[in-house]
Amino acid sequence: MRALGVKVLSACSVAVCGVAQGNLAAQTERQAEAPVDWEGIWVAERSFGPDLKGPVVLQSSGDGWAARIQGESVPVEQTTQEDGTRRWAFSVLGQGYFIGHQSAAGEAITGHWYQPPGKVQNYPFASPVRIMPAGNDAFSGTIRPFPQTLSLNIPLMPESGDSGDDPTRYRTFLRNPERNIGVFFRVVTATVDGDEIQFKNTDGDVRFTGNSVVPGRQFSLRLRRGGDVFDFTRRSRRGAVGFYPRRSPEAPPALLQPVQTDDGWRTASPAETGLNVELLSDMVSGLATFEPTGLRKPYIHGLLIAHRGKLVVEEYFHGFDRDTPHDSRSAGKSIASALLGVALERGLVSSIDEPVYSFFGGVEAFANPDPRKEQMTLRHLVTMSPGFECDDGNSETRGNEDTMQSQSEQPDWYRYTLDLPMVAEPGAKDAYCTAGINLIGGALKAKTGMSLPRFFHESFAEPLDIDHYYMNLSPKYEGYMGGGIRLRPRDFMKLGQLYLDGGVWNGKRLVSEDWVNASAAPHSSLNTEDDYGFAWWRQEYEVNGKIIDTYFASGNGGQMTFVVPELELVVQFNAGNYSDGRTRGRWRDRLMGEFILPAAVN
């Protein structure tokens, strides 16, 4: 066959072969000049550790105890505490440390793994670890640190449907489900120029530039000068799980009853508890088939509904699921309030009218002495009225949360806050002050003699059947009560059910009914008149001519836990509309006012 090929080729006339070769060259030139098609969804994903994780074994040796993890062996320190419990501790250089407690010899060791700040979330975390007896003189457990991952989604869409459009110019935006850093870059167009892709904002300014590695198939970029490189590849809908609500564009056929697990929730179908299934199905179908065409669109990660004590709706979107702890942002402030209620119920704090500075050694130990500081109580902290120069809505105030967290002169955030000057009598001025709520954690630590992760775990997490979470910490490795703890949606929702049931979860009382009622009552006016209780927001909805009272925990991005006593409802939202209060306010009120509440109103 090769000979035949050669013979035919040699028989080709010069004229014919010349024309054919010329046509081939022209075709190749046209293909080279034709613009590459970049339309589609481009995704980059990176993991920044931590490296240390997995099984850990504590084992006795002739010289004491050692912890073995990933082939390394480090010494374990044991001490007996005043309350008779045994404290266990070990550290792995550069990776973190463990502190746990054991009530009696031979029993499980319960504690936390403390990991240092990472590249994605630049503050420490504490995650629970339970180390169980594993034979003679040995214990075994698993370290599950917070994963430092970042995913970026960039759609490249034709500027319009006109055939005369510039084929190298696209509409675009940047989304990242974990934090949505695209809100700060605000790119709206992408222009391909040779092997570069320039991303520009509405003013035409280039915010960052990508370099094509394989035209139309891969490009790389740095979001900031000197930052990490992200490699983007084009994905199908099934591969862009963080961008689209679901892999399939089809509406789900029906609402499925949530799975029954061992986490304390009883489950049922919405029909079993008397909810309007058609309304709820329409809502979930709309969320599942939503096409994300812009930055300021609803990005709901999870929607859960409990009715009459049973979990009846559990739906996840954009790649999130039941077992992934979600950032709570300021919704975590309601947990700080609940912990204060727990301390009151257990007699660890006598009253919320105890003076704040009495927990920290007195007013004289801090800067900016002021007689008004003597009058400040825990009540003022939990109602956002301490009188500090502190307002998260005003970046000029020294107590502003971003100001406190970005400064490095004072890593002790309790002292930073207590040093603030006063601008009003406690109780006389309402202003959203995260630093003040965080002081509740310091007061609880002082009263209980426990670290906040330990107090949280023993008094809140364990009674509520919660065993997987990440508590964010201050630079001094103190639990941060201003918000941000990461809990699985089913677990955070238990806070709402606890309050709906008057302070009881599955027969276990954590807070008093009086505390629940006081928490939901009006105490402050932050955005509108009487819209804030004890770190819970209050809102009314009109449904079928009827006014329905609700109160809810709320955090940036759309992290909300609604309690609706009149309808025996608890609703959990998790979402990614960070730094976009207008968008999340719109979808919150539409979903609650047009679907969820009407589904429960007879």
Image (cartoon, rainbow, N blue to C red):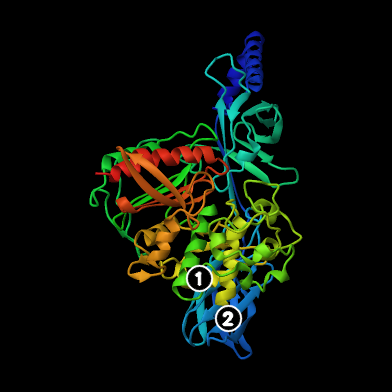
Residue 171, quarter of the rendered image: top right
Measuring from the top left, give residue 234's x and y in whole percent. 55, 36
- How many C-alpha atoms fall within 10 Å of the one at disc 2: few (<14), some, or many (≥20)? many
The correct choice, above or below, for 291 with respect to 323 in the image is above
Q: Secondary structure at mark 1?
A: loop
- Can residue 463 be seen by looking at this rendering? yes
* Disc 1 to disc 2, C-alpha distance: 33 Å
* Percent of width and height locating residue 155: 56, 33
Q: Secondary structure at mark 2?
A: strand
Q: Which mark is residue 88?
A: 2
Residue denoted by label 1: 351
Q: Nearer the viewer, residue 313 or 214?
A: 313
Q: What crowding class fits label 1: few (fewer than 14 Cα within 10 Å), some (14-19), or many (20 or more)? A: some
User: Residue 584: where, in percent of width, then height?
Assistant: 49, 41
Name the residue rendered at 60%, 39% in the picture. 183
Residue 272 appears left or right of 288? left
Q: For the residue marked with disc 1, what is the amino acid?
A: Ser
Quadrant for the N terminus in the image: top right
Q: Is residue 79 left or right of residue 314?
A: right
Q: Position of residue 190 (x, y in %)?
A: 64, 29
Foreground tag (1 vs 2) = 1
